[in-house]
Amino acid sequence: MDMNLSKLQEIEPSLEDMVMVLSPLFLVFMLDLGLIPQTLAQNDGYRGFLRKHYDPNPAGHNDRYCNTMMERRNMTRPCKDTNTFVHGNSDDIRAICDDRNGEPYRDGLRRSRSPFQVTTCKHRGGSTRPPCRYRAFRANRVIVIRCRDGFPVHFEENFIPPRP
């Protein structure tokens, strides 16, 4: 019996050995937990931006498109007055946050160096309760956004590009 116990002790690592191996892993895990909330908050802002303002392949640019998209993206309770959808590549939009496709504008905003195809949906007026009715306006223009930690988090609706 003592012989079997001796062999078992040789094969199985001691508690001290396991602690020595697992301690660094535990430390990395705990440090990672401290970074996750910040990363999630960054992603929440970016995901919100994408939900409200990004549609890579629009199925039309007419009033029906706006009515459908505004409802699909949960912006009709109450009816949002104005919202712009940016079409194209999300990497090109993200590039506005650095110098690849953006430049400082004002008040911490960034302006795109290249134009984007956009559809702006404007509420037709009347009640702010559903059903909401929108008018679509198509354009190809530069856009202005706010970035946080390299990610778009706000679309500046009040930016009106100068006429060429």
Image (cartoon, rainbow, N blue to C red):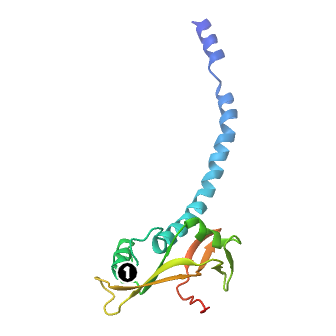
Q: Residues within 10 Å of mark 1 (few under 14, many from 20)?
A: some
Q: Which of 55 and 97 is in front in this view?
A: 55
Residue 62, horizontal then vertical, whole percent = 37, 81
Q: Which of 38 and 115 is in front in this view?
A: 115
- Image quadrant in which you'd find residue 9: top right
Residue at 48% across, 74% down: 53
- Image quadrant in which you'd find residue 37: bottom right
Q: In which quarter of the image is the C terminus?
A: bottom right
Amino acid on which the number 1 mark rests in the picture: Asn
Residue 155, horizontal then vertical, whole percent = 54, 79
Q: Name the residue under label 1.
A: 62
Vertical arrangement, residue 147 with respect to residue 32, above or below: below
User: In screen coordinates, is 135 left or right of 148?
Assistant: left
Vertical arrangement, residue 46 with respect to residue 141, above or below: above
Residue extending furthest left? 131
Residue extending furthest front? 164
Residue 38, horizontal then vertical, whole percent = 60, 62
